[in-house]
Amino acid sequence: MHFIDDWLALIPPLSVYLIVGLVIMVESLGIPLPGEIVLVAAALLASKNHNLAWEWIAVCGSAGAIVGDSIGYLIGRRWGKSLFTWAGRKFPKHFGPKHIAKAEQTFQKNGVWAVFFGRFVAFLRILCGPLAGSLHMHYPRFLLANALGGIAWAGGTTAAVYYLGVVAETWLSRFSYVGLGVAVVAGLIIGSVVKKRMMGSDDDEDTPDTADADTTPASDVH
């Protein structure tokens, strides 16, 4: 236990800050990276390593989100639909036609609120900037919602995880890191199962439409 704590203390704080900002920035460009996982891991690390300041993790996370979304906005405004067509071929699980259509519907219905609250939803977090740009959302309004959402998400998540980590440190010390790792893996597996079931339910909803189309009498087709 003490060996692991000593090893964590050797990681340069600047490296952690830069990694957090860079990963979140790249994710916000529209590239599927685990930005939230990196942010949470850094906050937990800060609760164990007193050389790390959670405030700087929050600042770098917020900056990465704002800058990445702004660049993503410019990319989406320039290349628009062709960008999502290409992304759908490269990353069908993230940018398939159904995903894009659902995201566009959310943005058109909720406007800047979709930008703000989209920061808290993994799928919309990736698409937020490029999609807002492709829909030609007014940039000053986008920037304001993007900045507020990025600060609320990165700052709130970092602070919550950090203080929960500090409070839980005594409790977690009763268990081995192996047990903690098993709990994390179990959580990831459960999340994956839930996601697959949700995707399966979407496919089931589309099936009746296909069946109806196949049973259309020939006399009704002109």
Image: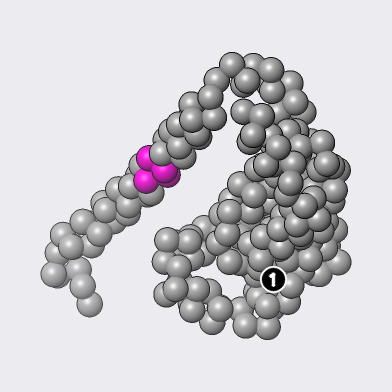
Q: Does residue 109 appear anywhere in the picture?
A: no
Boundaries of the magenta span: 191-196
Residue 204's x, y, as percent? 30, 48
Residue 175 position, x and y percent, is: 55, 20
Q: Residue at x 74, y 52 (%)?
A: 16
Q: In this view, does 215 lie to the left or right of 119?
A: left
Residue 177 visible here = yes
Residue 169: name its quadrant. top right
Work out whether residue 84 or residue 12 is closer to the camera in this orientation and state it: 12
Q: What element carries label 1?
A: helix
**In the image, farthest residue toward the left:** 218
Examine the image and state in which quarter residue 9 appears: top right
The image position of residue 217, as x and y in percent, is 14, 64
Say which residue appears at 61% left-offset and 67% top-offset.
30
Q: Which amino acid does label 1 sit on?
A: Gly
- Between 113 and 69, the one lying in front of the other is 69
Quarter of the picture holding the N terminus: top right
The local crowd at label 1, few if under 14, some if 14 to 19, many if 20 or more residues have their Cα within 10 Å, is many
Is residue 205 covered in magenta? no
Q: Residue at x 45, y 37 (%)?
A: 185
Colour style of the rendered protein structure: one colour
At 73% from the left and 33% from the top, the residue drawn is 48
Residue 209 placement, left or right of 195 = left
Q: In which quarter of the image is the C terminus?
A: bottom left
